[in-house]
Image: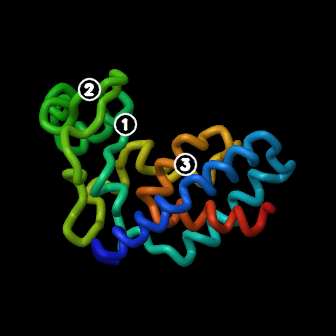
Amino acid sequence: MGNNFIEEYHQKASQKQTEHKKFLGKLKQKPPKDLDRKMLEIHEEVFERIDCLSCANCCKTTGPLFTQKDIERLSGLFRLKPSQFIEKYLRIDEENDYVLQSVPCPFLGADNYCSVYEHRPKACREYPHTDRKKFYQINHLTLKNILICPATYEVVEEMMRKLK
């Protein structure tokens, strides 16, 4: 999956943004009783056929939020004081959260492997949040992620097929 794939996918996702927003809005108003179970099935099904290592667009274009625990864990890994880790890699954003100074992520290799995978931030472990409970509570985030992550797009498309 090269840049062309991502550009084509982004264009397709942009064109469907209104349709996705409408669908997710309806889902939020009246979530099916077993939505969490259905979402987990759809999430697992999509991630069986999508290989994140062939894309890594999330790591190339967006930066995770770093919790205090993330900072402590990663600074320990690099044998830095938390303050040194922050100075070297992070900045404070407009919401007063620690985020990467720049993207692509400095821990992403040319092969799309994460050099800190076992120690990666909580936000990275949970991304794109399509397997979380009460999925409809993060529609704003899902709509953003659809434009970044082909798997999120596929999850929402699959939801539209199965939950109508």
CA neighbours of label 1 inside 10 A, class few (<14), some (14 to 19), many (20+): some
Q: Which of marks 2 and 3 is nearer the N terminus?
A: 2
Tell me how the rendering is colored: rainbow
Image quadrant assignment for residue 6: bottom left
The residue pinned by badge 1 equals: 65
Nearer the observer: mark 1 or 3; the answer is: 3
Task: Using residue 28 as the reference point, say whether residue 75 is left or right of it.
Answer: left
| Rendered residue at 63%/66% (across/down) | 157
Task: Using residue 46 as the reference point, say whether residue 60 is left or right of it.
Answer: left
| Rendered residue at 36%/75% (across/down) | 5
Residue situated in front as seen by the camera: 62 or 108: 62
Task: Using residue 82 as the reference point, say whether residue 84 is left or right of it.
Answer: left
Residue 136, position as x, y percentages in the image:
68, 44
Q: What element carries label 1?
A: strand
Q: Which three-letter amino acid code belongs to the residue tagged 3?
A: Thr
CA neighbours of label 3 inside 10 A, class few (<14), some (14 to 19), many (20+): many
Residue 82, position as x, y percentages in the image:
22, 29
Outermost residue on the right side: it is 33
Q: Is mark 3 on a helix, strand or loop?
A: helix
The residue pinned by badge 3 equals: 142
Residue 38, position as x, y percentages in the image:
76, 60
Image quadrant holding the C terminus, namely bottom right
Residue 141, position as x, y percentages in the image:
52, 43
The residue pinned by badge 2 equals: 92
Image quadrant holding the N terminus, namely bottom left
| Rendered residue at 60%/40% (across/down) | 138
Residue situated in front as seen by the camera: 29 or 104: 29
Q: Is residue 85 above or below residue 36?
A: above
Outermost residue on the top side: it is 96
